[in-house]
Image (tube, rainbow, N blue to C red):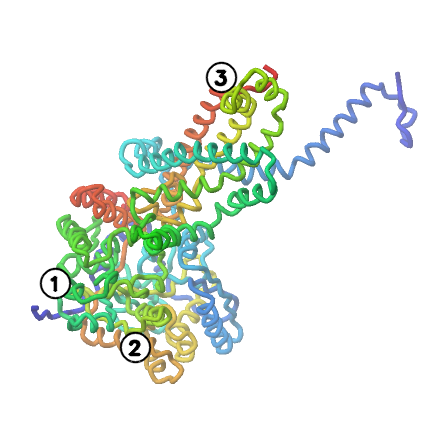
Amino acid sequence: MTATIPGDATANIVLPKNKRGASRRRRENIAGYAFMLPWMLGFVLIVGGPVVVSLYLSFTDYSILGDPEWIGLENYERMFTSDPRFWAALRVTFTYLIVSVPLVQVFALFLATVLNRGIRGLTVYRALFYVPSLIGGSVAIAILWRFIFQSDGLLNNFLTAIGIPTDYSWIGTPSTALSTLILLNVWQFGAAMIIYLAGLRQVPTELYEAATMDGAGVWRKFISITLPMLSPIIFFNVLMNIVAAFQAFNTAYVVSNGTGGPADSTLFYTLYLYQRGFVDFDMGYASALGWVLLIISGGVAALLFWLSRRVVFYGDE
Amino acid sequence: MSMKIRRTSAVLGTVAVGALALSACGGGSAAPAPTGEVEGEISYSFWGSPTRAEKVDAVIDLFETEFPDASVSAEVAEYYAYVERLTVRAAGDDLACTTGMQSTFFATYADNGVLLALDDLIASGQIDTTDIPEDLMAAGQIDGKQYMIPTGTFVRLLAYNEELVKGAGVDAPDDDMTWEDWADWLHDLQGGLPEGVYAAENDGGLMFTLTSWVIGHGETMFDEDGLAFSKETLADYFQYWIDLADDGVAMPPASIPEQNGSLELTPIALGKAATGTRDIPHLFIMEQALAGNGKPSAVKSVSMPSESDESANVLGSNGISIPESCDNVVTAAAFTDFFANDPAAGLAFQSDNGIVTNTAVQDALLEDAETPEGVKRNITTLRALTDAGDLTTSTYPEGLATLSTELLRLYQSAAFGEISVDDAVNEFFTSAESALN
């Protein structure tokens, strides 16, 4: 099989068809790379480059104003052996994660199940529950949170009005400050709820009908049908919430005025990293903190994926 | 109360920090002052509100009228954002030719060779400092070199709500108290205050109040090795505030995180506390806030308590520096000189960022009918302190921000009983070793 190139001065040259195809593929490849170029440049210059540089900086003593000085593993050694605030930040972050992520799932799944019953005004309720997810992470809500939980805040005014007078500072006391931030995170269950609601709509109704005919009750159907069928979505929501919990920053920064206080009770890992990098300008140490966070969050995600093989049901298995 | 002779010790912090500068990498040019025409474009960066930005614009207009071949562009940011960006800009040799600085953080830049030593420009007369008192000039010096021209000063004093004190039936505090005297006075005051109002704010975690405590106890804050005061002094300081809070005289430690740095929302400004350790320029702002909250009162001040002959009224300053990277030093010097000395510029700026340091400008402001009453009062208070020699100038080393965070954190930990006072003190000293080196 042969072909000529139309309109070409070399029309008398006859190319084999497979060569013509290779030429087109090459042109398509070039076009493809050309289209990808902006993204690739952005990735290399804005993401990949700084990531590699931060790895290098994590082995240096670097204060921004001077040149980085290579110190090997000293930053990591200091972090694990002589920095109590590193451990405090880990403790706060994991407490936040372990308490708030399951609570978000429970609230979201419970309300999704209720809303899935086809109640009247579903769209209104859905919107109402979803709104906190849109605004909950904002600085404005974090400031509002301060006004709710400070000693003369809305909560204490309410308690006083119902006969429980108190001027307890919920955000100013170490034992309760983190709880207020966990509550704020749980309040933003709407996004997870919407995803659960969509998942519930996908569960085949014949499964419930068959279970009903077999005499299964509501709880048995929830445990044996709903949860397994929703397990990929639960896995997705848990993973997303864990990643978000590791990255939590805004609310803690605003509520604690950037200190992580009182007494480090709200010192989230990212807040501590920020303090070391942009308050102390210890960029080498902050880079090391960033890499440890990456390793920890990557490890947790890997653990989740490993667990998912045992507990997540994809329907085609 | 014992009478104490107070004297100014303008060199305390300067000597302390000087050695740090010596061991650092350079710091300041030794080249003669450049000469030439005042022309071309420069920038002036500063922190503050839109109101302050308008006043700066007015000063720039006056400057450009005086020097038609020169132009200045203003760059303004909110305080914390400004301080944060400063280091990043310095790292990129991108500082404005005239950069707003403060005695609390300019050492970081001077020690790292970012700032130009201004002594030659002063000696050549390009920057005139003859009307700025020596004590105030010291706030911009390290190792005897001038890195910042102080243009607006602040002094830590004991502030009190006059109405609350009168209402409690106790005499006003006096200028000559020891810390123990003040504690006794606070206990008397608390007995006469309305329910829910505390005699004092809780300032146990404030670096500048600690500075007053240390100096008032006859010690020095910093030297070439880092912290220069004893662990016992810090332990006593922590315990002093913990005891006041335990007695219900100072606000509980849980009140500290509720404050967000806004002067209008401090316990004194809200009428929740009768006294606190505050800077002079802030008193009038708190008066206005009290009036706005329906609790009008004058906010008066007396000298900080002291156990020694040393004045514990610690002075700091805002000012202008010129970076080494500036390519138009002549115009930068002219603008700095104009900002610091020109009476018309002073009237336009109205002492907006600290009490204006130039005595001629102070006179102009005192004589001008449009000068706000609070500004006039601040100037009068500063002059009285200067005349009495009741001031101490302190400059601070690189790492102060870290140290301030640590002080607050460890005071809170001790006050909430999470760690002992001794452990808090030991941890503070350990942190200081790394922060100051």
- Horizontal side of B161 relative to A277 (left or right) equals left
- The residue carrying pointer 3 sits among few (fewer than 14), some (14 to 19) or many (20 or more) residues within 10 Å by Cα, namely few
Disc 2 chain ID:
B
Q: Nearer the viewer, residue A213 or B383?
A: A213
Residue B308 as seen in the image, left or right of residue B258: left
Q: Are marks 1 and 3 in contact (CB under 8 Å)?
A: no
On screen, residue A259 above or below B138: above
Q: In which quarter of the view is residue B49 placed?
A: bottom left
Q: Which chain is mark 1 on?
A: B
Say what secondary structure mark 3 lies in. helix
Q: Earlier in the sequence, mark 1 or mark 2?
A: 1
Chain containing mark 3: A
Query: Is residue B37 at all visible to an observer of this figure?
Result: no
Q: Looking at the picture, which amino acid does disc 1 mark? A: Asp
Residue found at x 13% / y 49%:
B232
Q: How much space separates mark 1 and mark 2, taking CA atoms?
A: 29 Å
- The kind of secondary structure element at disc 1 is helix
Q: Is residue A255 visible?
A: yes
Return the residue at label 3: A310
Is A89 located above or below residue A15 in the figure? Answer: below
Residue B376 in which image quadrant: bottom left
> Which secondary structure, mark 2?
helix
For mark 2, does the 10 Å Cα neighbourhood hold few (<14), some (14 to 19), or many (20 or more) residues?
A: some
Mark 2 near mark 3, Cβ–Cβ under 8 Å?
A: no
Where, quadrant-wise, is the C terminus of chain B in this rendering?
top left
Q: Position of residue B91 (x, y in %)?
A: 43, 50
Give the residue pinned by disc 1.
Answer: B184
Q: Which residue is mark 2?
A: B377
Q: Which mark is residue B355?
A: none
Badge 2 amino acid: Arg
- Determine contact: label 1, label 2, CB under 8 Å: no
